[in-house]
């Protein structure tokens, strides 16, 4: 009787080990992942030139973003600084336009292995400040909520690092006489 129970136990164990294993298909290592990134570059402000003013509209752009990646899309929340524009008037009076804000974006991606082109659309809540004696009689600050869009390319270096080159267009509102800001940045993101 004992030998029959032993044989049955061995038979059950053999049957269990003979069951086919479930094999999961490999998927994009970046899919369903959260990442943190930062980028740096230059921005070009569309500033209306005024008579008698010297305008310097080229400046620095900085970004920090937190994203969650899906296969063909990603959702990003980020902080953006579009830098400043310096204007000088008669008598050495100087004024500065500074802009920074928080934005939320949706990226639509085309995964092509380690290369990933994308289109980005979103909304930026920006605060633009005017400082300096040149703007003493003008609006000191203005907040705007506008649509932003961009184009870019991600380059994945393994499963934890990604490089990004991006162009972004930010509308700053007609109230300040600004048509918008074009930003060109490069940066990197790290998955965790």
Image (tube, rainbow, N blue to C red):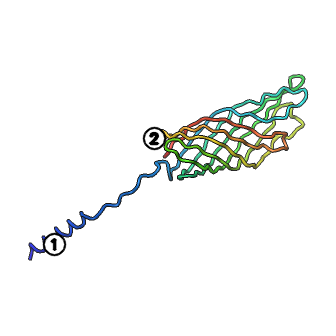
Q: Residue furthest top?
A: 91
Q: Is residue 153 above or below residue 93?
A: below
**Number of numbered discs present?**
2
First in residue order: circle 1 vs circle 2: 1
Residue drawn at 63 percent across, 34 percent down? 40
Which structural element holds mark 2?
A: loop
Residue 74 screen position, x and y as percent: 58, 51
As drawn, is 69 to the left or to the right of 4? Answer: right
Q: Which residue is mark 2?
A: 158
As drawn, is 111 to the left or to the right of 176? Answer: left
Q: Which residue is mark 1?
A: 8
Residue drawn at 8 percent across, 77 percent down? 1
Residue 105 screen position, x and y as percent: 65, 49
Q: Residue furthest front?
A: 112
- Is disc 1 in contact with disc 2, using a CB cutoff of under 8 Å? no
Where, by quadrant of the figure, is residue 25 drawn?
A: bottom left
Residue 68 screen position, x and y as percent: 55, 51
As drawn, is 165 to the left or to the right of 178? Answer: left
**Viewer-closest of 86 and 26:** 26
Q: Is residue 28 above or below residue 131?
A: below
Residue 116 screen position, x and y as percent: 55, 43
As drawn, is 43 to the left or to the right of 117? Answer: right
Q: Residues within 10 Å of mark 2 (few under 14, many from 20)?
A: few
**Viewer-closest of 180 and 90:** 180
Residue drawn at 77 percent across, 32 percent down? 85
Which structural element holds mark 1?
A: helix
The circle drawn on residue 35 is none
**Viewer-closest of 96 and 133:** 96
Residue drawn at 81 percent across, 35 percent down? 47
Query: Marks 1/2: CA distance?
Result: 49 Å
């Amino acid at each position: 009787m004992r030998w029959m129970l032993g044989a049955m136990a061995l038979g059950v164990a053999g049957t269990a080990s003979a069951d086919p294993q479930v094999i999961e298909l490999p998927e994009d290592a970046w899919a369903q992942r959260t990442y943190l990134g930062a980028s740096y570059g230059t921005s070009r402000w569309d500033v209306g030139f005024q008579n008698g003013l010297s305008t310097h509209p080229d400046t620095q752009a900085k970004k920090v973003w937190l994203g969650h990646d899906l296969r063909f899309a990603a959702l990003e929340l980020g902080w953006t600084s579009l830098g400043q524009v310096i204007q000088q008037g008669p008598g050495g009076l100087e004024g500065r336009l500074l802009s920074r804000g928080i934005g939320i974006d949706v990226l639509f991606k085309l995964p092509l292995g380690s290369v990933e082109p994308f289109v980005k659309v979103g909304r930026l809540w920006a605060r633009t400040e005017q400082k300096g004696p040149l703007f003493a009689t003008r609006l000191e600050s203005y907040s705007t909520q506008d649509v932003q869009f961009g184009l870019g390319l991600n380059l994945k270096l393994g499963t934890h690092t990604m490089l990004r080159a991006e162009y972004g267009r930010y509308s700053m509102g007609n109230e300040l006489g600004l048509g918008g800001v074009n930003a060109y940045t490069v940066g990197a993101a790290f998955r965790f």
